């Protein structure tokens, strides 16, 4: 037999299945391409196509590869798309032997809903998150009272029972968003030619639906939000109760307060759009005074900062996380220099989030996307088309891109929400 350029080999054969909206979302086509790209072959044993747009479809695929190692590597790639082995056995559990280190061969998670098979029963994974391990814990006197949750590597402790290998783990295929025709009517996921007004209205509808359902909306903001004049509109959204959590960096908070205290953003007048004399030091002077007060909240209480996004967050009790970086000026006393601790704090605020707005930020958008379940509606507004592409390439396939000036976007969104 000849397979993948080799002859006289005994091939490895395994059967997989995938179920969901696998046709209209092109998941099935992507899966078949991945199989061929791996120099493997496939045979469709069963294909059951849903009759309506709300019906799911199912496919059973027999995959033939040159050896078991190739099948194993391919299975890991396919599971990102919700493809699972048929006739799964119980998951293998191995106890961690070092703090902060997962056992060799650990199962590396996706952000899709998943289940783990334990003693013949499928147990759902709590809080799906990509690039983690899976830890199994016993919650009661009965050994059957077990939960499975994602566990970041640095949180592993000796004795934690970790899922090893792909056996006994199944994930659900990504579900396409409904009612987002403005994002879907063109072939590309991201395009500058899509109608912005319709996109903004549909994002506003998602935000309203989240609030009506009692869920949260998360805003992830970069400094360009302030530079483009969008700060007052994000502040409007916070004040109106449309945003329940904020993730940003030192720069966003600094320039937000600079624009309200000194009328500039990175030394450029927000009213006239022109550099001001000595303006290059304005953000440093604001940082220095906030540090003198000891915190952003204290500087607001003292009357030093009297408006803006950070002001509205403090007044409304909206939690925020300012994740630091090596290039931060100051930094502000609220900026978390330890990025691992910042990520953990972000994880604490993610449960309950139904909509995430990524506004003109690459690094914070990717960092947030890494900890968001795939079911969170994610909208990335940026003038640079590559930003949302990077976000999707790193696993946040649910992200919808809106290529536009972020200042105009948040203004329209605030107007739409009223």
Image: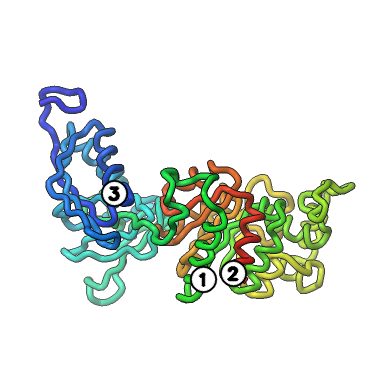
Q: Marks 2 and 1: CB-CB under 8 Å?
A: yes
Q: Label 2 vs label 3: CA separation?
A: 38 Å
Residue 398, by quadrant, is bottom left
Mark 3 against mark 1, which lies toward the viewer? Answer: 1
Label 1 sits on residue:
208
User: Could you tell whether 30 is left or right of 183 in the image?
Assistant: left
For the question of whether residue 348 can be seen, the reply is no
Compared to residue 49, the image places residue 188 above or below, namely above
Label 3 sits on residue:
79
User: Could you tell whether 288 is left or right of 9 in the image?
Assistant: right
Picture residue at 56% right of the left edge, 48% below the top: 403
Q: Secondary structure at mark 3?
A: helix
In the foreground, 84 or 163: 84
Q: Label 2 vs label 1: CA separation?
A: 8 Å
Picture residue at 64% right of the left edge, 66% below the top: 415
Q: Label 3 vs label 1: CA separation?
A: 33 Å
Of the two numbered discs 2 and 3 on the same chain, state the one appearing first in sequence.
3
Residue 318, by quadrant, is bottom right
């Amino acid at each position: 037999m000849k397979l993948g350029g080799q002859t006289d080999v005994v091939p490895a054969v395994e059967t997989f299945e995938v179920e969901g909206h696998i046709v209209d979302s092109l998941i099935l086509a992507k899966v078949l391409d991945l199989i061929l790209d791996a120099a493997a072959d496939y045979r469709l044993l069963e294909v059951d196509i849903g009759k309506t747009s709300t019906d799911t479809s199912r496919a059973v695929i027999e995959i033939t590869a040159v050896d078991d190692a190739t099948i194993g590597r391919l299975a890991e790639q396919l599971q990102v798309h919700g493809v699972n082995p048929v006739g799964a056995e119980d998951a293998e559990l191995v106890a961690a032997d070092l703090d902060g280190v997962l056992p060799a061969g650990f199962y590396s998670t996706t952000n899709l809903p998943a289940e783990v098979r334990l003693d013949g029963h499928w147990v759902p994974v709590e809080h799906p998150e990509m690039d983690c391990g899976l830890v199994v814990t016993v919650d009661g006197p009965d050994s059957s009272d077990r939960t499975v949750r994602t566990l970041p590597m640095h949180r592993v402790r000796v004795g934690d029972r970790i899922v090893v290998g792909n056996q006994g783990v199944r994930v659900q295929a990504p579900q396409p968003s409904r009612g987002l025709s403005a994002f879907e009517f063109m072939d590309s996921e991201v395009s500058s030619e899509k109608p912005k007004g319709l996109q903004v209205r549909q994002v506003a509808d998602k935000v309203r639906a989240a609030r009506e359902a009692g869920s949260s909306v998360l805003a992830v903001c970069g400094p360009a939000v302030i530079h483009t004049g969008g700060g007052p509109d994000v502040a409007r959204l916070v004040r109106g109760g449309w945003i329940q959590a904020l993730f940003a960096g030192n720069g966003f908070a600094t320039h937000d307060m600079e624009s309200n205290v000194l009328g500039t953003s990175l030394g450029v007048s927000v009213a006239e759009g022109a550099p001001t004399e000595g303006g290059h030091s304005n953000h440093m002077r604001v940082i220095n005074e906030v540090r003198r007060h000891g915190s952003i909240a204290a500087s607001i209480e003292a009357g030093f900062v009297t408006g803006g996004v950070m002001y509205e967050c403090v007044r409304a009790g909206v939690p925020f996380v300012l994740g630091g970086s090596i290039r931060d000026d100051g930094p502000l006393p609220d900026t978390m220099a330890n990025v691992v601790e910042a990520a953990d704090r972000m994880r604490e605020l993610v449960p309950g989030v139904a909509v995430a707005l990524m506004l003109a930020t690459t690094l914070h958008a990717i960092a947030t996307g890494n900890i968001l379940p795939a079911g969170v509606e994610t909208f990335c507004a940026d003038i640079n088309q590559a930003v949302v592409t990077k976000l999707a390439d790193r696993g946040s396939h649910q992200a919808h891109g809106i290529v536009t000036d972020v200042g105009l976007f948040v203004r329209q969104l605030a107007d739409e929400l009223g």
